[in-house]
Image: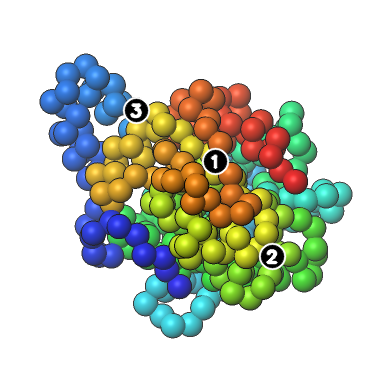
Amino acid sequence: MSITDSSGESGRSRLTRRRLLIGAGGIVGGLGAGGLYVASELQGDFGNYTAADSAPAVTTRGRVDPESEETASAEVDGEWAFEEADDLFLFVHGFETDDTTARDQAAAMETGLESLRLTPVVPFSWDSDLEWGPAKEMADANAEPLADWLVDWADSDGRPVHVVGYSLGARVTCGALFALAMRGRGDAVASVSLLGGAIPNDSVGRDTQYGEAIHTLDIPVTNFHNADDRVLGWIYRLSDRTQAVGQTGLADSADAPEGYEDVNVTEQVPDHYSYFQPEEGCLPRVVDRLP
């Protein structure tokens, strides 16, 4: 079940990140040196971190069809060799990310956690390397498989899972929270951290699907937002004609559901690509708010 946003665009929008960059570049190009600075900020990277070939992953790649009424299941691969771990992070990546990059991003986050909390980070790898409209549809379609996997893990293993939804991965994550709330399975998630969430800034309010799910599940959901995130401030706002919760926080703080918290990390995070990177992201603040 998908949440309604205020994008005003069809799900078949022919927007790719490259086209959005070109469009944003054209707009900011007329703003002089400041515009050129913003344009340069839109073309970052995630650092040079590489996951081991045997690293564990949860994946739905090639398994989910947004047009199908049947819910696909996620599968696991790699070596799940962390029997001594007390808990784990499940990292849900964002837009236009292939499987290799998804795993490398999880490796970057795990590296950043080494001095903070020795907890394995497993990627939830989904088919986000699409154009923008279809990628949002795919995000919605991956909510149920993510929820299914979390329930299966809770029933078979039981160790706490901290879900991290990055960028468009926040849409997958919040959709999964709604699915879990419908089943009464708040026990399947220990906490949720949204990093640079590419969802509308009113979509987690008390009377929305996401907000009702957060309230019902009674788990901590923390949104780490960055006012200087130019990808959200320019590209996301250009494409969806609304502001992202990952840039502004919840539109109306008085509308926050119980269990939800906004954390401003503008001073700690230099750009959209750095939230989970070692030394320059906000992982210390993420860890500080874990239950």
Q: Nearer the viewer, residue 8 or 60?
A: 8
Find the distance from the CA under tag 3 to the CA under tag 1: 24 Å
Q: Name the residue under label 2.
A: 186
Mark 3 closeness class: few <14, some 14–19, many ≥20 residues within 10 Å: some
Give amino acid for label 3.
Answer: Glu
Residue at left offset 48%, top offset 82%? 70
Q: Which of 64 and 249 is in front in this view?
A: 249
Residue at left offset 80%, top offset 63%? 158
Above or below — where is 106 with respect to 218? above
Give amino acid for label 1.
Answer: Asp
Per the image, label 1 sits on a secondary structure element best described as strand
Left/right of residue 22 with respect to residue 284 in the rendered view: left
- For this orientation, the residue located farthest to the bottom is 69
Per the image, label 2 sits on a secondary structure element best described as helix
Between marks 3 and 2 in the image, the one whose residue lies nearer the viewer = 2
Q: Which colour scheme is used?
A: rainbow
Q: Nearer the viewer, residue 58 or 32?
A: 32
Quadrant hosting residue 69 = bottom left
Between marks 3 and 1 in the image, the one whose residue lies nearer the viewer = 1
Residue at left offset 56%, top offset 70%? 179
**Which quarter of the image is occupied by the N terminus?**
bottom left
| Residue 11 image position (x, y, % from top left) | 28, 65
Q: Is residue 80 visible?
A: yes
| Residue 246 image position (x, y, % from top left) | 45, 42
Q: Is residue 169 visible?
A: no
Q: Mark 1 points at which residue?
A: 262
Find the distance from the CA under tag 2 to the CA under tag 1: 21 Å
| Mark number, residue 41 | 3
Above or below — where is 154 with respect to 21? below
Mark 1 closeness class: few <14, some 14–19, many ≥20 residues within 10 Å: some
| Residue 92 image position (x, y, % from top left) | 55, 52
